Amino acid sequence: MKKTTRNIVLLGALTAIELLMIMTPIGSLAIGELKITFAMLPVAVAAIALGPAGGTIIGAVWGIGSFLCSMGIGMAPSKMLIALFAVNPFLTFVLCFVPRLLDGLFIGLLCKGLQKVLPPYPVFAITGFCAAFFNTAMFLGSLVIFFGKSDYVQNLLTKFEISELTLITAVVFMAALAGVNAVVEMISSTVLTGAIGIGLHQAKLIEVSAGKTTGETA
């Protein structure tokens, strides 16, 4: 990511939007134990407009903000993260931070590669879908790995009538825990990221030629 005025301003704006979405109710919709979050949108936009470096930075902001919510900071606390923080603060930080940082990096690299072979809108839409999909997969996978034996997760296993965590039951558990939440997140992220990406292109913030995005990326 080149340090141009446009990139710095855009990065600052996306950072502010990301923090607003994490720390206030505006960026999520609570349903049961989990929340439908739209916090992946600034990460996806950063990956599209600023490349892997921009995606990684906003992903890191998302992770830090999520960890702050686990300590009850902000107006959008997560019951799950607060419960996990009480079990192990360090692993809760890893759970909040690493998947979100990697999410930004991975979709930034994916977007950069797709730009070479696909027209703009499919690139933007696929990037949005993967922003939600990668986050859900990595977060829930980390939850099982780090907290699978905790009382909190064991109680959730009982709720879903799963007696023991094996590779197969872990996949079933993650699918059951994500449920409709994950599907809604993936659909909304796909549609909204595609629309925002096209808007940025039309505003000349992303330069696109036929079949390839030629704007500045990391």
Image: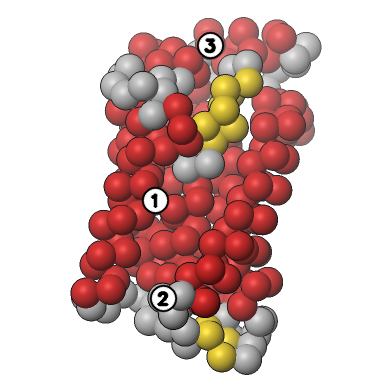
Instruction: Please tell me how crowded label 2 is: few (under 14), some (14-19), or many (20+) other residues with Cα within 10 Å.
Output: some
Name the image colouring: secondary structure
Q: Nearer the N terminus, badge 1 or badge 3?
A: 1
Q: Nearer the N terminus, badge 2 or badge 3?
A: 3
Disc 1 designates what residue? 59
Residue type indicated by callout 1: Gly
User: Which SS class for mark 3?
Assistant: helix
Asked if one can make out residue 41 in the rendered structure from this viewpoint, the answer is: yes
Residue type indicated by callout 3: Tyr
User: Could you tell me residue 55's position as x and y percent?
Assistant: 40, 60
Left or right for 15, reference 95:
left
The mark closer to the camera, 2 or 1, is 2
> Image quadrant of residue 88?
top left
Residue at 50% across, 58% down: 44
Left or right for 173, reference 131:
right
Disc 3 designates what residue? 152
Left or right for 189, reference 158:
left
Instruction: Please tell me how crowded label 3 is: few (under 14), some (14-19), or many (20+) other residues with Cα within 10 Å.
Output: some
Separation of residues labelled 2 and 3 (CA atoms): 45 Å
Disc 2 designates what residue? 205
> Image quadrant of residue 63?
top left
Residue at 30% across, 28% down: 68
With respect to residue 80, does 169 lie above or below?
below
* Res. 95 mark: none
Number of marks in the image? 3
Residue at 68% across, 71% down: 122
Q: Quadrant of the C terminus?
A: bottom left
Asked if one can make out residue 145 in the rendered structure from this viewpoint, the answer is: no
Taking depth in this image into account, of 33 and 27 the one nearest to the observer is 27
Q: Nearer the N terminus, badge 2 or badge 1?
A: 1
Q: Quadrant of the N terminus?
A: bottom left
Residue at 70% across, 39% down: 184
